[in-house]
Amino acid sequence: MQAKRVDVDSKVLLDPTASQWRDVPAETISMGPTPAENQNSRYVELWARERPYGKLGTLTVRAAHNGKDVAFLLVWPDSTQNADFLDGNSPDGAGILFPLKGDAPLNTMGSQSQPVSAWFWRADLENGGQSLTASGLGTVEEAGDGQIATGARWESGTWQVVLTRPLALKGQAEAAVQLEAGKSVKVAFAVWEGSSGERAGLKSFSKGWSELELEA
């Protein structure tokens, strides 16, 4: 996967319908449910075994950077738009995951010795996005000012969500992935379908790391 270098203002890339996204190659990412046995409580594990979840089969991803900020456009089918916790539903969401040290285990959201960094969007969040870290199941924490900006649009059964961030964050090497044009990093993706009650560890995710190259 490549993050294409583009001469486009970051504010333009925040619009998931911007025409400039058409010039950025799309990648199809295979998705599947997180394992029921990997949930962080027995209650959630039993719930997961009794109710279908993680039904999203593929996610379309486009990635671009302008030398200052990097942006990801995530597109997936979702027949219902969920923006709150209501009647057993949860808000729709999406995430992008990066290892902070080595080849962190993806199934368990990292480990104590190999934590991960996540960019998280959820339809009910006032500011749209959050920067998170995790070092294993049930250890997700906010990572301060991750400078995640988001833009989202749901129409006719499809979500289009953009997450952007500066390539590097000074003084945050322990809590945020540092990106650089011409270099590569591992990346993975997750989607939460609110109409299925998906939240926390119940989600669709890409079951392996992909190599992301930031075009020089």
Image: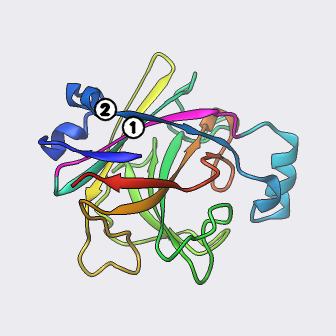
Q: Amino acid at mark 1?
A: Val
Is the C-beta separation of discs 2 and 1 under 8 Å?
yes
185 above or below 77?
Answer: below
**Circle 2 is placed at which residue position?**
16
Amino acid at dot 2: Pro
Q: Earlier in the sequence, mark 2 or mark 1?
A: 2
Q: Residues within 10 Å of mark 2 (few under 14, many from 20)?
A: many
In terms of depth relative to the viewer, which is nearer, 154 or 99?
99
Residue 27 falls left or right of residue 150: right
For the residue labelled by badge 1, is the local secondary structure a helix, a strand or a loop? strand
Instruction: Provide residue 99's location: percent of width, then percent of height.
Output: 49, 68
Q: Residues within 10 Å of mark 1 (few under 14, many from 20)?
A: many
Range of residues picked out in magenta: 54-66
In the rendering, at what x and y percent does residue 157 appear? 51, 20
Residue for badge 1: 161
Which secondary structure dominates the residues rendered in magenta? strand
Front in this rendered view, residue 84 or 123: 123
Residue 1 higher or lower than 186, as above or below: above
In this view, 83 is above or below 39 = above
Q: What's the residue at 37%, 61% (across, down)?
A: 184
Left or right, 55 with reference to 49 = left
Residue 135 x, y percent position in the rendering: 59, 75
Tell me which corner region of the image, top left, top right, bottom left or bottom right, holds residue 171. Answer: bottom left
Is residue 58 in the magenta section? yes
Give percent across and percent down for residue 10: 17, 46
Left or right? Give the position of 178 relative to 74: left
The image's colour scheme reads: rainbow
Residue at position x 58%, y 21% in the image:
79
Q: Is residue 89 magenta?
A: no
Which of 4 and 57 lies nearest the eye of the viewer? Answer: 4
